[in-house]
Every structure is written in structure tokens, then in C-alpha cells.
Amino acid sequence: MRVAFEPIIFPEERPPEHAALCDRCELSGHRNRVVWGEGNPGTSLVVLLDNPGARENREGVPFVCGTRETLQQAAAEAGFRPDELYVTYVVKCRPRKAYDKPAARRACSAHLSFQLMRMRPKLLFCLGNVALQSFLGDPEAEVKTMRGSWIERAGMAVAASYHPLAVRRRPVLYAHFLEDWRRVAARYRAETAAGSLAQAGKADNPPSRQPY
Ligand code: SF4
């Protein structure tokens, strides 16, 4: 039985100045703004999706789309608090019609690299084949073969699972989706506990004073 939870609107992180007016690809003509990421940029876990979805309804009122609702549901069941998550995208502008996907993903990859370099998360969780393939730069990579394992890339442990929209369309996938979230949660707890211990160790054993 699923745990009861209230989907929430994560706070959006504003894009850095150099990205806010980006016109590296045709999606600059689709968007009303660059959606850099949402959630807590100080966390150790970044969740990567393909692109931002609808964030406001026609009247401009913010709402939680189905993708984010399913993502948050599984994250909550795996024991994550909302402030332990940060979600970002392969392309940071919301597409409104057909576009050259490979070109846009290539163009936007510099923003993702910059973002991850700046945040330095310990874990990256790719949801869906587009996120996985784009991040790895491997068009053959597939969630169904990678899920359940970790690979190390650019100083991060990388895991993958289904796109939340695929899970909504095929509810039978939810159990696997949740299983993957729980695996990520276990590693996140281990990493953050190790980080806390390291911090505590530093506090308990301050560096010895250097002689003048
Ligand atoms: S999708 Fe990325 S590269 Fe394309 S215009 Fe938006 S921010 Fe720039």
C-alpha cells in the first residue's frame, strides 16, 4: 500500500546569469524561462530528467505535474524528505512542439556539466533513457539493463530508473521504480552518514597548529 503524501512545488533555483538568456538551441524560442533546477541545491543527490514539464496551468497557477507527483511519491516512500532532493534536466527549456532533440541535448550539455561541477553531488539518479543516454554520452545505454547497478562517473555514483511518466503509464513498473529509489536512499544515507562522521572527526581533531 502506498504511503499518504502531499505533492509539493519544489522551489526553483534561478539560472546563473550566463544561462538565463541562453539561445544555444531552438528551445530558446519555446520557453518562457530557463528552468535550471528545483529543490535543494545543497543536497548530495541530483535527480536528472529529460526536460522540464508544465509548472503552471493556463491561468499561470503553479501546479505539480504527474511526472513530479510520481517522482515525489516514490521518493517519500523511500524515506526522502523533500529538502534532500534536487531535480534538474538534460535540456533546461520546456519544449512546446517538435524540435531537433539531439542538437538541443548536445547544446545544453554544457549547462549540465557546469551545474554538476558547481554542485558536486555524490549521487546522480537518471530517470529515463534520455537522461541516462545523454549523461553517459552513450545512445545504447538503457535503464532496463542498468537499473540495480552503480557506475562511477565524474566523481559521482550514478544509478538509473524508469521515467516517472513511463511509470504512470504502466503502473506495473512502480514496484521496480520504488525498489530503485530505495537503493538510492540506502546509498544516500550511507554517504551522508560518512560525510557527517568526517565532519565530526574534523571538529573533534582540529588540525594541529602550524609553528610560525
Ligand atoms: S535548452 Fe539549454 S541550450 Fe537550449 S536554449 Fe535552453 S538553456 Fe540553452
Image: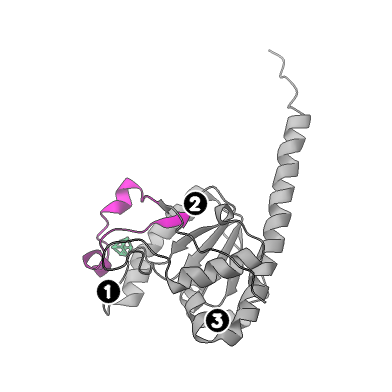
Q: Which residue is mark 3?
A: 142
Residue assigned mark 2: 117
Q: Amino acid at mark 3?
A: Glu
The residue sitting at the top extreme is 212
Decide whether residue 32 is among the magenta residues. Answer: yes
Q: Amino acid at mark 2?
A: Met
In terms of sequence position, does the residue under pointer 1 or pointer 3 come before the other? 1
Please provide percent x and percent y for residue 138: 50, 76
Asked whether the beta carbons under mark 3 and mark 2 sit within 8 Å of each other, the answer is no
What SS does tag 1 mark? loop
Helix, strand or loop for disc 3: loop
Distance of mark 3 from mark 2, alpha carbons?
A: 25 Å
Residue 85 falls in image quadrant: bottom right
Q: Position of residue 42 (x, y in %)?
A: 54, 47
Indicate left or right for 120 with 35 as reference: right
| Horizontal side of residue 172 vs 102, given as left or right | right
Counting residues from the N terminus, which is met first, the one under dot 3 or under dot 2?
Answer: 2
Q: Position of residue 140 (x, y in %)?
A: 51, 82
Bounds of the magenta segment: 13-40
Residue 143 can be seen in this image:
yes
- Of labels 2 and 1, earlier in sequence is 1
